[in-house]
Image: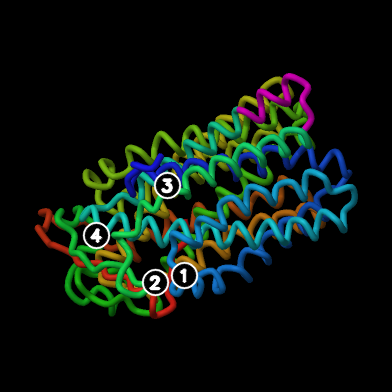
């Protein structure tokens, strides 16, 4: 471990964070049944998680500037893993809320630390790696979800699985964070990033629209994106994370409470979603090179919309077809939304959006992803969970509609444009993993 390089360390950090999120999300149906939460109180739990994360993110960014992202990760990664013990041991709804706020705060700090380090490694490499990092995260989520599903099917209760996961992931985080793998990547100041130019040409279709497109409301090559475009990109990112959050927090609950599936089957639904997302993320760069950013994102939104449509249909078809249809639907949703966030960040970087605008887009996106699942819970309590799932379905459709107007058309010929992406965290900007 002492000879671990920067790329290996950040890859393992993304993988373990994916496992951590899976342990939390895949055991949520068990927590729901254990404490008899119901849709309304489960929504409050998710609001508490979101509130903790959003409160911690600005503080974590400040710490990353002065303390380095590496040191932030060394504290936040094992801290977030250890914080799983709180919800696992919670014996009542009020205690659960308190422990989930703490978990959310550490999740938020962990996301900031991951992003600071990933951007540093990406700039040092001189080529985009963010999509691969997110693919590694989903691979961890698949592994974690499969482990939870296996444990539940073997009659291990959700509380024991959370406690075991907390201990194993804490030890793993301490081991990954021990070497000083990224010291050379830090700037003179603790939070500064190196400003090395990309060595590879920008991918076709990534922010390479006609001149003046930023003024028309789409993202143009080499132009500073307008405030309207920045907000639109944030909405597209939020749509991706709302769908991911719906799968993480509600796919299993939908399977148990609406389709009458067993908890082990409900956890399998979560796992299938992330299997599909992982496969497409590792292929996402090649797909974007072939189709361009706009066409890729439009296709992604359309596929995700179709998948969520199948999930909505699952509740009204004959009972023997309900769970298979829902699994197929969530798989398509994962396929569709896998590439949206990597395309959004790459396109903004290629357009010289700068650290502040990238940070703003990230905050909108992750804010939507944190608050969206909670909103689904409140709508489910007021109406029904199938009605509430129209929210992610509508957001997926919005991505398909917005893709070409915001990201622009694919150019006739790829432009050999070298792009410099300079993200200076000393200005208070950061990205979330």
Q: Which residue is mark 3?
A: 134
Magenta stretch secondary structure, dominant: helix
Q: Which residue is mark 2?
A: 190
Q: Which residue is mark 1?
A: 67
Q: Nearer the viewer, residue 61 or 361?
A: 61
On screen, residue 387 versus residue 190, left or right, reads: right
The quarter holding residue 423 reads: bottom left
Label 2 neighbourhood size at 10 Å, few (<14), some (14-19), many (20+)?
Answer: some
Q: Earlier in the sequence, mark 4 or mark 1?
A: 1
- Give coordinates of residue 124: x percent, y percent: 24, 57
On screen, residue 292 versus residue 157, left or right, reads: left
Residue 263 is labelled as: none
Q: Name the residue: 40% across, 73% down.
A: 230
Q: Are marks 4 and 1 in contact (CB under 8 Å)?
A: no
Q: Nearer the viewer, mark 3 or mark 4?
A: 3
Quadrant of the image for the N terminus? Answer: top left
Q: Are marks 1 and 2 in contact (CB under 8 Å)?
A: yes
């Amino acid at each position: 471990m002492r000879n671990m390089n920067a790329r290996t360390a950040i890859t393992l950090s993304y993988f373990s964070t994916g496992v951590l999120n899976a342990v939390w999300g895949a055991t949520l149906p068990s927590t729901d049944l254990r404490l008899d939460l119901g849709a309304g109180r489960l929504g409050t739990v998710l609001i508490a998680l979101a509130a903790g994360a959003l409160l911690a993110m600005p503080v974590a960014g400040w710490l990353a500037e002065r303390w380095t992202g590496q040191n932030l990760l060394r504290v936040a990664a094992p801290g977030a893993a250890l914080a799983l013990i709180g919800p696992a041991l919670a014996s009542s709804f009020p205690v659960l809320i308190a422990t989930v706020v703490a978990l959310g705060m550490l999740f938020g700090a962990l996301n900031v630390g991951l992003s600071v380090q990933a951007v540093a490694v990406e700039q040092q490499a001189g080529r985009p790696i963010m999509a691969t990092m997110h693919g590694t995260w989903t691979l961890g989520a698949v592994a974690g979800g499969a482990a939870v599903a296996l444990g539940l099917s073997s009659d291990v209760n959700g509380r024991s699985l959370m406690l075991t996961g907390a201990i194993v992931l804490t030890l793993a985080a301490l081991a990954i964070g021990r070497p000083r793998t990224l010291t050379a990547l830090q700037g003179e100041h603790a939070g500064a990033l190196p400003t090395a130019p990309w060595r590879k040409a920008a991918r076709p279709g990534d922010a390479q629209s006609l001149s003046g497109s930023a003024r028309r409301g789409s993202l143009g090559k080499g132009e500073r994106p307008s405030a309207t475009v920045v907000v639109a990109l944030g909405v597209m990112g939020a749509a991706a994370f709302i769908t991911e959050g719906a799968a993480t927090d509600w796919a299993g609950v939908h399977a148990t409470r609406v389709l009458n599936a067993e908890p082990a089957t409900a956890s399998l639904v979560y796992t299938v979603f992330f299997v599909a997302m992982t496969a497409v993320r590792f292929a996402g760069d090649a797909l974007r090179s072939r189709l361009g950013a706009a066409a890729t994102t439009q296709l992604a939104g359309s596929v995700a919309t179709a998948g969520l449509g199948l999930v909505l249909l699952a509740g009204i078809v004959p009972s023997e077809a309900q769970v298979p249809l829902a699994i197929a639907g969530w798989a398509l949703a994962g396929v569709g939304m896998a590439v949206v966030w990597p395309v959004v960040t790459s396109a903004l970087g290629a357009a010289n959006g700068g650290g502040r605008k990238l940070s703003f887009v990230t905050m909108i996106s992750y804010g939507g992803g944190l608050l969206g699942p909670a909103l689904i819970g409140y709508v489910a309590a007021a109406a029904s969970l199938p009605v509430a799932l129209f929210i992610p379905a509508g957001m997926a459709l919005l991505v398909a509609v917005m893709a070409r107007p915001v990201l622009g058309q694919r150019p006739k010929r790829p432009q050999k444009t070298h792009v410099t992406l300079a993200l200076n965290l000393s200005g208070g900007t950061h990205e979330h993993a």
